[in-house]
Each structure stands twice: as C-alpha cells, then as structure tokens.
Image: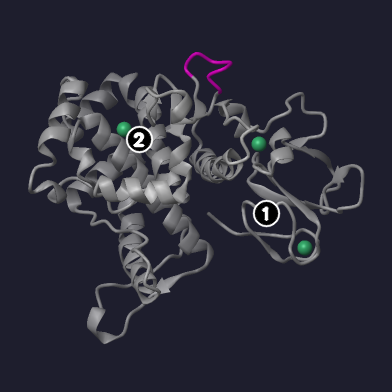
C-alpha cells in the first residue's frame, strides 16, 4: 500500500485518513483511479481541492468505518467496498463498533489490492457469481464459522478482537493470525471458483501443482485435525494448514501471494534498499519497481526475501514478532508463480 498526500498542504495521508492532521482538510479515497482527494472542511459541499469536482462520502462514513468517495450524483449510497457488505455487526451493541472498524480497515485494504490487480468485484446481492461479506457475532449464530461458501465470506466478529485473536493463534499454534490474513485467504477460495474451476486448462495445471482437489474435503480436514501436518511440510507448503487439502493450499498460497505483493509495493513506494555490510552479501535488494507492473514473479519474490529479512530484524530490535514469519521455498514460489501468471492473464 502506498501513502497518499494532502491535496491542500502536501502532508502525508494514510489510506484510512478522513482528514489531514496538518491542515484539517477532509480527505477521502477515490477508488476509480486510486487517489486520495481533500476538501475544504467548512463548505456544505465536498468540492475537491485540486480538481474542483463535487463528491459525497460513502454512507458508512457516518459510522467512521469508511472514507471512500462517490461522485455527488452517484445513485449509490455506499462505495464499491461497502456495497459488498451483506451483514454488518449489530450496532446497538457499542462493543461491536471498534471490531467492525478493524474489519473494515482490513477489508478496504483487501479491496484496494484486488482492484489494483484488476479483478472483477461484483456484489453477490446483484450478481449470482458475485462476492459479499458477512461480519457476524458467533454468540448469535453458534454454528457459523469464519470461511467462504459460494461467494459469501464470513468473518467472525471475535477475530477483530486482538486479545481473542492472539489467544486463538496460540491455541492453533500458528505463527501469524491477522484480519487481513483471514480476508486474503477467504477471498482466495472465491477466486478459485471464478478463475480456476471455470477453466479446464487452468484447472488441469492447478491439479499438477497443488494436487487433485476432488479428494473429499471434509474427510481431508478431519484427517488433518486428527493427525496434523506431515513432518516435512515446510519443504513444499507455506503453512501447516496448507497441507490439509489442495483448496486450502491454494487459499493459503494466494494469501501469501497478496502479502508479498503488498509488502513489495510498500517497499517500492518508500524506495527501500537492503544492502547489509560485508557478511550478508547475498541478502541485497533495491525495490525499483511497482510489483503490479512486473510480469516475472521471480523479480518480485527475489526483492521480497531480503526485505522481509531486514524488516523482521527491525521488529526483533523492538521485541515484537516477525512481520513475515515464514520461509518461502522453491515449490511455494512455483505455486505463487502460477497465481501471478493467472492474474497477469486476466489483465
Ligand atoms: Zn493538509
Ligand atoms: Zn464505503
Ligand atoms: Zn480456507
């Protein structure tokens, strides 16, 4: 993700900002061309500082969970990211607000990235093959789980509570558990249906890399939860869970592909260069490209490895967990390359 700039005073603005901390001009995100716009705060109408066009905020701005813009005469009340919400938390319960906000931060970043890749994001409420989100409290729906089914991505509200999430991470013995990670994983299942299953040629290539997904899914998951991952899992899978079934391998690898692209995009924006002294000569990189414009995935992953090594080391300096606690082996790179090529072919 890049960092934006105030149209009035040039101060940096984060993707989530709804005002400039320096000049107090209002700010909002226009997804059509991925730009942040700013507005004079005292005016009745939102007229953009630079282009002088009239906008309105997405209706979810009322709840401070969205800063996206629509043109003033747009017939929709909600932005393209919020039009995908089918169920939002019960807002009469004040405790739900901060959790919903955390979910929306992650969801908006996900939508930013999927739009940047150029993927179709139709709402399931209007298109049978579309996508939607249910953000649901488990206590009201005991059987509901975080997951994907037929275009519906369900995320349990408790995942948005950092204490409960950390507890679950420990119980599941996972190195990493985040909302953006969940969303990237679940949307991977959705795009498997759209991009792989519907295309015989892609499907057979998928099977040659990830294995045959026709093996019974619930049996495979049951076996995984009973026996765990095979001992040598890390030589060809990105996570233990990825070993449970080819669909889960795909979704896990897809999530990591999106992690890598976002890390490298951010590094490119900041012009990051990793050039350690003498001893670590092979851990060098200079991110001179936007990964979304690069066809060869090898270039991207080669930049990402030294980068995550450096950033992990900075995190360790502060006593916090590694930002990217994973080892990407060649078989995993091959899987990510398949995803990259498939997405490239959609452009
Ligand atoms: Zn400003
Ligand atoms: Zn919105
Ligand atoms: Zn999954």
* Residue that lies at the very extreme toward the right in this rendered image: 43
Residue 31 lies within the magenta run: no
Q: Viewer-nearest of labels 2 and 1?
A: 1
Q: For mark 2, give the secondary structure.
A: helix
Q: Is residue 16 visible?
A: yes
Tell me how the rendering is colored.
Answer: one colour
Secondary structure mainly formed by the magenta segment:
loop
Numbered circles on residues, count: 2
- 255 and 35: which one is in front? 255
Q: Is mark 2 within 8 Å of ligand 3?
A: no
Identify the residue shown where x is 62% and y is 32%: 82
Quarter location, residue 247: top left
Percent coordinates x, y for residue 116 in the rendering:
53, 43
Q: In screen coordinates, is 296 left or right of 228?
A: right
Percent coordinates x, y for residue 248 in the rendering:
26, 33
Identify the residue shown where x is 27% and y is 19%: 200
- The answer for how far apart the CA atoms under marks 2 and 1 are is 33 Å
Q: Which residue position is annotated with label 1?
A: 17
Q: Is residue 148 above or below residue 322?
A: above
The quadrant of the rendered image in which ligand 1 is seen is: bottom right
Quarter location, residue 322: bottom left
Instruction: Please tell me how crowded label 1 is: few (under 14), some (14-19), or many (20+) other residues with Cα within 10 Å.
Output: some
Instruction: Please tell me how crowded label 2 is: few (under 14), some (14-19), or many (20+) other residues with Cα within 10 Å.
Output: some
Identify the residue shown where x is 30% and y is 60%: 302
The region drawn magenta spans 123-129
Percent coordinates x, y for residue 347 in the rendering:
47, 35
Dot label at residue 112: none
Q: For mark 1, give the secondary structure.
A: loop
Q: Which residue position is annotated with label 2?
A: 342
Percent coordinates x, y for residue 15 in the rendering:
62, 52
């Amino acid at each position: 993700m890049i960092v934006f700039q105030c149209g009035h005073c040039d101060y940096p603005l984060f993707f989530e900002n709804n005002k400039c901390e320096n000049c107090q001009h209002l700010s909002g995100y226009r997804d059509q061309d991925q730009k942040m716009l700013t507005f004079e705060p005292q005016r009745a109408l939102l007229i953009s500082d630079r282009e002088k066009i009239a906008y309105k905020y997405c209706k979810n701005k009322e709840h401070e969970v969205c800063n996206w813009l629509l043109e003033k005469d747009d017939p929709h009340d909600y932005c393209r990211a919020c039009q995908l919400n089918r169920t939002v938390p019960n807002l009469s319960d004040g405790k739900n607000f901060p959790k919903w906000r955390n979910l929306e931060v992650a969801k908006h970043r996900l939508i930013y990235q999927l739009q940047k890749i150029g993927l179709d994001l139709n709402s399931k409420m209007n298109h049978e093959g579309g996508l939607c989100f249910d953000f649901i409290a488990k206590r009201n729906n005991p059987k509901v789980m975080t997951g994907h089914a037929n275009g519906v991505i369900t995320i349990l509200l408790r995942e948005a509570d950092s204490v409960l999430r950390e507890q679950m991470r420990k119980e599941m013995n996972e190195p990493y558990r985040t909302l953006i990670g969940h969303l990237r994983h679940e949307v991977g299942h959705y795009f498997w249906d759209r991009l792989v299953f519907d295309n015989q040629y892609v499907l057979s290539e998928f099977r040659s890399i990830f294995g045959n997904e026709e093996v019974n899914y619930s049996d495979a998951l049951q076996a995984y939860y009973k026996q765990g991952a095979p001992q040598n899992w890390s030589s060809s899978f990105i996570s233990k869970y990825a070993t449970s079934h080819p669909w889960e391998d795909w979704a896990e690898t897809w999530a990591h592909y999106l992690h890598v692209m976002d890390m490298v995009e951010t590094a490119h924006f900041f012009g990051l260069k990793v050039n350690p002294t003498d001893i670590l000569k092979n851990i060098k990189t200079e991110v001179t490209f936007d990964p979304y414009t690069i066809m060869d995935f090898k270039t991207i992953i080669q930049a990402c490895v030294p980068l995550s090594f450096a950033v992990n080391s900075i995190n360790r300096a502060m006593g916090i967990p590694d930002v990217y606690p994973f080892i990407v082996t060649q078989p995993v790179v091959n899987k990510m390359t398949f995803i990259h090529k498939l997405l490239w072919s959609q452009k």
